[in-house]
Image: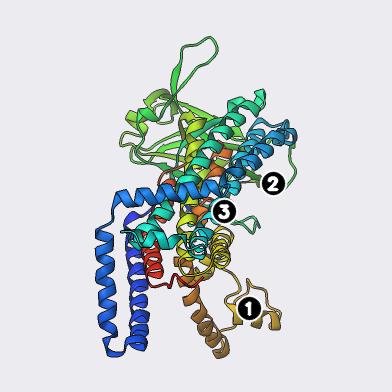
Amino acid sequence: MLPEYVAFDLKSAALQWLLILGVGASIALLFAFIRSFALYGTNGPNEVGREIVEGSKDFLGISPRRVGALTMLTVREAIRRKALLVFVVFGILFLFGGWFLTQSNDRPELQVKVYVSFVLTAIQWLILPVVLLLSCWGLPEDIKARSLHTVVTKPARRNEVVLGRMLGFIAVGTMVLVVMSLFGYVWLVRQVPESAQSQLICRVPVYGALKWKDREGNEATKGINTGDIWEFRGYVEGATRGRAIWTFNNLTPADMVEVQEAGKEPVERLRVESRFQAFRTYKGNMNRSLLAQITLVNAAKKLAIPLKPFELSEFGNVVTLIDRKLTYDDDASKTKKTIDLFDDLASDGTLTMEVRCLDANQFIGMAQPDLFIRKPDLPFASGYFKSIAGIWLMMALIVVLGVTASTFVKGPVAMILTFFLLILGSWFHSFLDQLVKGSVQGGGAIESMIRIYDHKNPMVELDPTARNRIIKQIDKIPFFGLRVVSQIVPNFDRFTMSEYVANGFDVPFTEPVPPYDSALLPAILSLAAFAFPCLLLAYYSLKLRELESK
């Protein structure tokens, strides 16, 4: 199945988080009871209960004043450790970056993409190493220098120490990020060539649900596969009954945009933007692209209004403007009729668009985000600073993980552990999810070795023999551990939102748009989901740790 544009299910995510937290807490309690029996014998359960009661009192009695003092202390220590030297690297990078980016591509939209990607990537990969080093080395260095002993002898609880460290490092990172992002925005607006300034926008799309019809006009689960390994897009065959059907809900006249034509009064129109791919089975006329046509349909009223055919743009988007008043030829009465887009076609806020290919034996490919209604654009700053907010959320999560790791291991080990989680969650989390869901072709480890030995292609199913059935069952055992890992390792792809801005789109709040996996709400909830368990783990790790051990 093709990936779809779906809403973020907050209820399902909350239930899953509670389940994982409950399982994790149960395992932690089990190990605590085993350890307490080993140390205190039959008095062990009482010790565990006492620690739980004391921890509850500490969290209920958190003092904002003490946390604020520890946060300020952390900020001063970070500045004293020359954390702000990252500005020097940032300045040098942007000082000479324009030499290599100016006029890097003749196409304006690609010029903007290069500049925006450079700025956001530079900010992200300069801020992350700074907070990684600070958060992982802060507490171990304080313990080694015995400066933490002064703090814990005061009326400061261990959870306040941990919280003060986290907030302090986040404050330092925020200060650096604010300066970088403001400088980067000004640099970006000034450095983008004049010919590409019009591309510095944030398009606000409205996506619809996608369905298919095959060449015979019957409903299909997906489009035609023309041999592309990446099945993100399905294809429709030309000059057949094959259709790609988008259904848009909750449309109102407010979704229309004001269009100014030369010498005419501004008119409000519905702006539809599309980007389809062409697949040619024969050369044809290479001076002309394939033809596609959009038809507006209201099945209940038996209305089907075909719009003017248009040529596909091989390297850009095609904008179709739809007037509110539409004129069409009525076959029954043999006259021209005029209808209203919202009163007649989309009277209940639902509008259906069917897309077909007009060239025989040719194909056009499309995915759910490839056709959308484009609402009035937002300023470029809107998407830019939302992307910066995603970087801030990622930075805060790295601080939380780094400080937590530093409470039970030394600085170098904490840094390696946090960096490993960053790499695993950034580049391998999607592959891990595919393994867990069983969508990776070739099966598990043992099945893959059998396929290599038998010289069988991963796309060919194994024979249903007893041996192969046993192998498939054995391969499911490691997948349980992988499932646990996929649930506890952060998905850092949710925080990377630069692709939206680089391609001229606003950053979505709740619904990630395929093939991307990022949106603001999932990113915010991911940080919150890890912050509370990490604070508990860091508190008890620091509370039970022998501070004299360096």
Q: Amino acid at mark 1?
A: Ser
CA–CA distance between discs 1 and 3?
Answer: 25 Å
In this rendering, the count of numbered labels is 3
Question: How many other residues sit within 10 Å of disc 2, few (<14), some (14-19) or many (≥20)?
Answer: some
Question: How many other residues sit within 10 Å of disc 3, few (<14), some (14-19) or many (≥20)?
Answer: some
Hey, which quadrant is residue 15 in on the image? bottom left
* Proximity of marks 1 and 3: CB atoms separated by less than 8 Å: no
CA–CA distance between discs 3 and 2?
Answer: 18 Å
Question: Which residue corresponds to the image point at 51% horizontal and 79% vertical from the top-left?
Answer: 478
Left or right of 70, for residue 232: right
Q: Position of residue 240 (x, y in %)?
A: 57, 46
Q: Position of residue 461 (x, y in %)?
A: 59, 76
- Residue 355 visible to an observer of this rendering: no
**How is the structure coloured here?**
rainbow
Q: Which residue is mark 3?
A: 232
Q: State the mark number for residue 280.
A: 2
Question: Which residue corresponds to the image point at 69% horizontal and 83% vertical from the top-left?
Answer: 454
Q: Which residue is mark 1?
A: 448
CA–CA distance between discs 1 and 2?
Answer: 36 Å
Height in image: 416 above or below 335? below
**Mark 3 or mark 1, which is nearer the start of the sequence?**
3
**Mark 2 or mark 1, which is nearer the start of the sequence?**
2
Left or right of 217, for residue 446: right
Q: Position of residue 380 (x, y in %)?
A: 52, 31
Height in image: 483 above or below 349? below
Secondary element at image label 2: loop
- Front residue (pair 508, 73): 73
